[in-house]
Amino acid sequence: MDRTVNIALAGNPNSGKSTMFNQLTGSKQYVGNWPGVTVERKEGKKKYNNYNLNIVDLPGTYSLLPFSLEERVARDYIMEGDPDVIINIVDGSNLARNLYLTLQLIELGKPVIVALNMIDVAENRGIEIDFQLLQKELGVPIIPVIARKGKGINELLDKVIDFIEGKEIFKPKDFNYGQDIERYIDELSNEIIKEGSFSGSNIRGIVIKILEGDKDLESIVYNKDLKKLYTGRMNNNVTVADKRYELIDGIVSNVVTKKGEDEDTISDKIDRVLMNRYFALPIFALMMYGVFWFTFTAGGFFLEKIDIFFSQVLTLYVSDLLNNMSVAPWLISLIVDGIIGGVGGVLTFLPNIAFLFIAISILEDSGYMARVAFIMDKAMRKIGLNGKAFIPMIMGFGCNVPAIMGTRTLEDEKDRLTTILINPFMSCGARLPVYTLFASAFFPGNESKVVFSLYILGIIIAIIMGLIFKKTLFRGESSALLMELPPYRMPTLKGVVINVWDKVKGFLTKASTVIFAASIILWIILGFNISGPSDMASSFGAQFGKIIAPIFKPIGFGTWQMGLSLITGLLAKEVVVSNLSIIYGLGETPNVIEFAKALGPEFTSVSAYALLVFILLYTPCVAVIAVIRRETNSWKWAIFSMVYQFAVAWIVAFMVYRIGILLF
């Protein structure tokens, strides 16, 4: 029977862990060129030489002393998950920075193999590393790899098997921290052994972590006098860290040879332009506008083709087929008007969503998005956050669910709560079909400008609400921005395809489940009332819509059709389009542009823009509410988010509508 081997992949953010995970498991996990892409552990399997390898990709961390939730996930698995082997992914082009975690892992006494990644990048920078000497200095196997190209993967796995089969014995090296700290280590070790409060074999590594300030481990020391001794006489955390950096400096000076003078890299030269203090913000705004221009220009061509397929080909074909089969009229109506009209009305906008994510993926993979955190740091600091909080907000352009999970990278809990609550203001891809529909109908030729203005408005409202929260609910100073900038890289076709497919697949899954079910339910409530089948104007849906419509009348769209559509949008924002498609009969109209124009009698350009503003800002979908509940561990914040966002949306839409009708 094949043995199962548990392998943990640990390393600094952006060191290539997820790339290694994909190479080892054949997975297609998204790899972004910015820190914080992986915020929870991911597992994959591989069969190798009669062994079942269970491989766990951990969030990136600089230390086993966690400051954020994602770092705690990594720390807890390494300390408590009991992996058979730890593969430590080390960025060879930044050896000194990466070795801090390496020394901590070695001290824990668990088998460690160092996968020295990006050695090609190091060589290009004139950095030569003596692998044999590094192996001797650390006392663990060193395997040079280029994870991106799959080089060195088999050698790495062979070394894992050597550990499992006993051909390689792990003998952790005791790094000397100097006389004072070594004395503390000896005293604490002896006391813990005497108390019998720790049964593990590597008590030295545990004691060093206690000296660093690991609160979870302090409980194994019962002697209060001894606790005072090591917590009162010295700032142990800083002292241990200083000594560890001294050790690392010594190791690096022995094993690394630098050829030539330090010269600016290509990334440095690009940053002089893109990060310029005067031009950075205008360039960022220009890039975002370019994203939406590309989305509508490229997506518009395919939109028309798909639109014709649903409205003129599929609808007529299915209608004729069902009529020839003598299917009941009500069932034909359900399939054509309900399902094809509802689901097809949303799928028509698939090209726009795909091209939006292509553009965003290219910016992410190039390394530019990571720099946006620094560009926005000054603005974010004014609302009590730092630029790092802007990264989850950018992720919100795709979907607010992973974006809110991405707030785990923030160390300060108040900063994290603030970022969670303002994140839904960042316009997700699900809103794009609604924008496209109304922008095409009421702002022809200016679709890109209209949608761009909505995304900018979302950012502005998020910043304003963040400022209000930091002045009221979550008072406190912002933490300093400490973040590593990745080098610029040319996005790969494979990476962009994986990321875009991941997003498109989610959209298609939603269309085949939530939107499919919602379309059937909407067809029913729009075709029946308490007396049975009815016309739409007296249906359940219309009656419910008429009850809530007065809420929206002051902001310019007080019809029962819009009232009902906005409520159904709480399931998923795309359902707004699905609902409108059924109400206005997409299956019977020539194309989606004509369908959009059917809304004309009920909207002016001002009320249409007010509606788009409301769609941008109002209560997020149920999936986002659920993740807010999970990440805050509180229904209080989930309900608060629902209520306050609706209020903000109504107020801002009211201002837009009222000012708009005065001006136009």
Image (cartoon, rainbow, N blue to C red):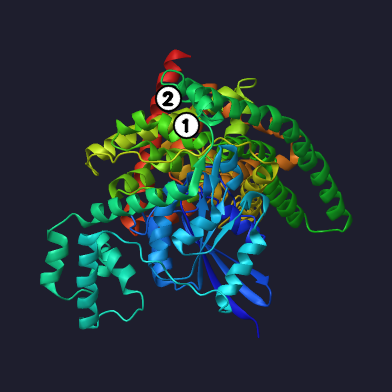
* Position of 296 relative to 533 (above/below): above
Q: Is residue 412 left or right of residue 373?
A: left
Residue 245 locus on image (x, y percent): 34, 50
Q: Is residue 319 left or right of residue 551?
A: right
Q: Is residue 604 something that shows in the picture?
A: no
Amino acid type, label 1: Val
Q: Residue furthest top?
A: 663
Residue 491 locus on image (x, y percent): 64, 38
Residue 562 locus on image (x, y percent): 53, 39
User: SS at mark 1?
Assistant: helix
Q: Residue furthest left?
A: 225
Q: Are marks 1 and 2 in contact (CB under 8 Å)?
A: yes
User: SS at mark 2?
Assistant: helix
- Between 145 and 179, the one nearer to me in the picture: 179
Badge 1: how crowded within 10 Å, few (<14), some, or many (20+)?
A: many
- Between 311 and 20, the one nearer to me in the picture: 20
Amino acid type, label 2: Val
Q: Count the marks.
A: 2
Q: Residue furthest right?
A: 324
Any mark on residue 172, and which? none
* Position of 362 relative to 271 (above/below): below
* Position of 609 relative to 65 (above/below): above
Q: Is residue 44 something that shows in the picture?
A: yes
Any mark on residue 656, and which? 2
The residue at which mark 1 appears reads as 613
| Distance (Cα) linking label 1 and label 2 | 8 Å
* Position of 520 relative to 359 (above/below): below
Q: Residue at x 69, y 33 (%)?
A: 299
Residue 416 locus on image (x, y percent): 34, 47
Q: Residue at x 46, y 38 (%)?
A: 485
Earlier sequence position, callout 1 versus callout 2: 1
Q: Residue at x 62, y 33 (%)?
A: 437
